[in-house]
Amino acid sequence: VGNPIMFPIEVQSNDPSCDEPLCNIQKICDSIVDEHKSDPHKPSMEILASIGKKQQAGRCKQVNFQLLIDYFSAPSTAKSANNRSWYYQTCTEFGFYQTCEDNSNCPYARGHHNVDMDFEICEKSFGIDAKKVKASIESTREYYGGWDLIPGDDKSTVLEGQKRLLFVNGNADPWSELSVNEKRGSSHVQTINVPGASHHFWTHPVKESDDNHVVEARKAIYRHVYDWLGINEDSPRHYDLKTE
């Protein structure tokens, strides 16, 4: 979902309409290509370091695994509470680890982050070992019914409830690989694919520069919810998606 060591902008929050230098995927990629064209022999890591330096205004980015362990191990503060509670949830419920394995298609530094590192954070920060993490993930899958979203044996009740589930995915969002979509998961739920969109970009404040696909996704979501609630789209409660 992004490499915060090198790029402070995450892929999942990519904003195609941002106007700052190096503020989205396209601008970063263009900069990488330009640097490579200007010096084809320049090592890739130097190019990435150059971009990172520009983003950090020349400041160094400290990379220290022990500092990460210390950060998650310390009692939560207003600054760390969100990150710490999220990581605790990955250890106790569902994993969601962003690895970059050898012999994979990962676009970052392969082999420098495998799942054992995440297990180590869980154990050293929260006292939860790898065996417990794996058991918690399996328990979560059973509770929600896995890809089919059918927990237990009463399929008729579950399938009726699935009619009011809507999965919305942006195809530029790395997390979409873990979501139900038109090709994977229960065929009874409704899905919307948003071309070019990043992580839940349609929930961001409305802007005139929003891509048409994002605008149409918002309209589709409203239509689904109105249908579930029995609200007529022509009623006064219908929102103008360009202004709300």
Image (tube, rainbow, N blue to C red):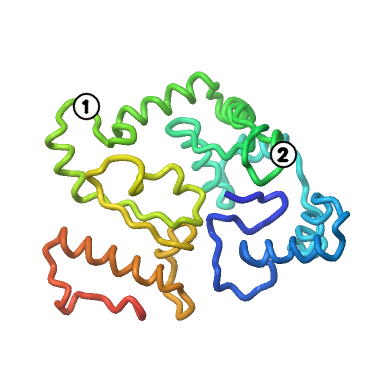
Horizontal arrangement in the rendering, residue 18 relative to residue 21 (left or right): left
In depth, the one of 95 and 35 nearer the eye is 35
Q: Quadrant of the C terminus?
A: bottom left
Q: Which mark is residue 67?
A: 2
Kind of residue at badge 1: Gly
Q: What residue do we see at 48% from left, 21% from top?
A: 132
In depth, the one of 24 and 235 nearer the eye is 24
Q: Is residue 56 above or below residue 112?
A: below
The CA distance from mark 1 to mark 2 is 43 Å
Q: Secondary structure at mark 1?
A: loop
Q: Dot 1 surroundings within 10 Å: few (below 14), some, or many (20 or more)? A: few
> Residue 206 falls in which quadrant of the image?
bottom left
Horizontal arrangement in the rendering, residue 185 relative to residue 225 (left or right): right
- Between disc 1 and disc 2, whose residue precedes? 2
Q: Secondary structure at mark 2?
A: helix
Q: What residue do we see at 45% from left, 72% from top?
A: 211
Horizontal arrangement in the rendering, residue 32 relative to residue 199 (left or right): right
Residue that badge 1 annotates: 152
Kind of residue at badge 2: Leu
> Where's residue 152, x and y in %?
21, 26
